[in-house]
Every structure is written in structure tokens, then in C-alpha cells.
Image (spheres, rainbow, N blue to C red):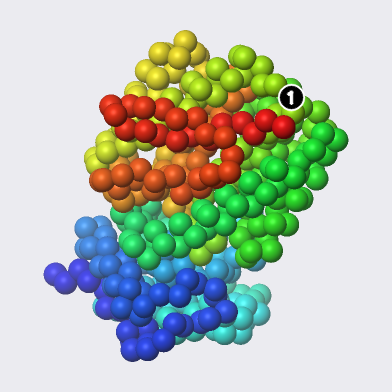
Amino acid sequence: MNSRIPIPESQSKEKKRVNPSSELLAQDISLRSFELNEKYGRLGAFLDRNKLDAILLSRHENIAWITAGQVEARVALGVETAVTSLLITRSGLHYYLAPANEAPRLADEEFAGLGYEPVIYPWHESSVPLLRELAGDAALGSDTPATGATHVNLTALRAPLLQPEIDRLTTLSRETADVTTSVLESLQPGITEDEMTARTAAALLELGITPTVLLMAVDDRIRKYRHAAPRSGTLERYGMINLCARKWGLVVSITRFVHFGSLPEDLAAAFTAAARIHSQLLHATRPDATSAQLFAVAREAYKSAGASEEIERHHQGGPCGYGERDWLITPHGQDTVTLPQAFAYNPSLRGAKVEDTALVTEDAVEILTDTPTLPVIETVIDGEVYRSAGVLQR
């Protein structure tokens, strides 16, 4: 059985960058065709393995992935599903189903040049009858629960990352890190957590980057809460900027700290320990390593730091890409590392946290959200040097 899904006709014939309004990175058309062909190949093999004839994609991360980051069909920021769904068949038919009120923008700004046929329905009616008409008796998979369809999870298909995805992720990481640095360096005692949040969000949005997580905290709230959503705190000495940011469907994570006055010895020691745990996790991120094996590395690292209990107080992160985390490292997790892949680990203890987005290949670990003008903690493991973010002291 042929598992490769043909690339849509109009995309395969495209001679120039499509849909300039999407602000995708400029790239050679051969690279774009390679990316789409590879993804349709993975999807076709997935349909074969699961004995499916077609698949319905409604989740943002899967729509962005299969369209090479072009389609942004999000209206409500907190909703996991788009205002359109993609129906892709093994034989190579490609449709997008959309209510009439969304159709003009989707046609002009999202699907231009991708080769998908629009299927439009009144906004006050359901798309189900049209879906059934298109799919017929085909064995249908869906990434959201749907009547008559097999619920499937496509997370594993999104790894390994392809070079065009790495290029986009690198650009997003650099821009997000620059914003984080700029905002952190602008903070002064007296600023509120809400003002920190607004300043960060505005700088990201100005670059076309959408913040998906904004955790700003100051002073005692940083020590008390691992997920400190902004409330009414006012910065006195210690401030944290913790965020996730999305563009082209990709998501990166970063956390940075500022301290006014000398850093307390216990807090400095906690950052050194967190940096070592972070480095040990990156060092252990090798092909086919499982979630459980990585968690065991983290557990042992916390134990060696004399803080065994700290691992129970917050998750430790895991691979990322089209989601804040594709999966978390857990004691019994069986998900496996597939390189090249992006990772966002976030070990924390005693008010300290280290979090960056890293690209891990078989040959190297690169911190994509590196902030070179801010303090760095270096950790050496088996002769390899790993760089983790320290605390900016003012």
C-alpha cells in the first residue's frame, strides 16, 4: 500500500513564496516542498498503520504543523481548536471546512497557495453533514473527539524537526529572548506584576509573537509558588519573567530573574543546583531515551543537590515544538526522544528556576533562547560545557 499522501497540486507548482501576509521566513521553494512532502509522507504512513482512509485535523498545533506554519486559524486565544478543520485523505484530497463568516479571511490570508479546496457552511449550522458527505464510508481519524471517527494523537509525528522548522524556531527563540532581556533590564523596584506582564506581552505582540504563558512574580511569591500567575505584587528586590511564546505554530519557553542588591547565598546556591540539574537533563537527552529514563536522571540530580523533595513540587518539562510541551518527563513515561528535537526543561528549587528552549541534535545541544548579555552559570559534565541562565543583579 502506498503510504505517501500527494502534495496538493497548487503547492507543488508554486514558484515563489506563497501568502506573503503570513510572515513566514523566506525560504527556497524546494525546502518548503521538502517539508510538506515529508509531513504528508509521515501522515500517510500513520493512516496506513491505523487502517484509516482520511483524517480530520482541528487542533491548532496539527494544522500549523501540516501547513508548514502557514495557517493561523485561531480567533479565541484560549481555545485548542481552530475556526476551521482540515480533511486530508490518503488519496491526496485536501479540504478545509469553515463557516461562511470565516471563509474570506481564511482564503485570502491562510490557505493561499496551499492547494486546499474550501468547503463552506452557514455559521449557524454544523459541518458534520458536509464532513460525512466528503468522507462517505471512509475510515476516519480525528485529532478531537468526533462521532464516527477514531480519536488519534499526532504528537509523535511532529518529531524529528525538519530544517525549515528549526530555522523558524531559531528565529522565534532569538526574538523572544531579546524581548525577555529588554524587559528584564527595564525593571525597577516599584513596578507591579501586572505592569511586567503588560510590558512583556506588548513587546512580543509588536513582533507578531503571541504570548501563551505569562507568569510574572516578585519577591516572596517566587519562593512560595512554582506557577506564580501575576497578581497584585510590587517588585521590591526579586523579580521573575516566565513566559511561553508562539509564532508559525511553534512555541518556545524562557525564564529570567533580576535581583536588586546582593543575591542571598542560599538563592545563589539554589541557582547553581538548578543549573546542574538542567545540564544533566540536556546531557542525558539522547536518541531513544524515554520519558521515564530522563525523569530518573532528574530525580538523581535533585538527590545529589540535597533536595530530593523538590522534584515533587513541579513538573520538569520535556520536548516542545508545536506545544508548550509535547510530553513531560514522568516516572513511568514511555515517550521517546527523536532527534533533532527541541526541549524545554525547567528544574526549580528554593525560589530558583532554570528554563530555556534548547535544540538537541545527535552532535550538539544549542540553547536557542540564549541571552548572552545576562549572567550565565557554566556546568561541566564529561568534559562538555553547558550554559544556564543566572540572575541579573542590579
Front-lying residue, 45 or 320: 320
| Residue drawn 49% across the image and 21% down it | 273
| Residue 362 shows in this picture | yes
Residue 336 picture quarter: top left
Which percent across, then down, holds residue 81? Answer: 55, 60
- Crowdedness near tag 1: few (<14), some (14–19) or many (≥20) residues, C-alpha within 10 Å: few
Residue drawn at x 52%, y 58% is: 172
Which quarter of the figure is the N terminus placed in? bottom left
Judge left or right: residue 310 versus residue 296: right
User: What amino acid type should be assigned to the residue bearing mark 1?
Assistant: Gly
Q: Is residue 344 left or right of residue 208?
A: left
Query: In this figure, which residue is indicated by the disc labeled 1?
Result: 261
Q: Is residue 370 above or below residue 137?
A: above
Q: Residue furthest top?
A: 306
Rendered image quadrant of residue 90: bottom left
Residue drawn at x 34%, y 56% is 161
Decide: is 164 above or below 189. below
Residue drawn at (50%, 76%) of the image: 97
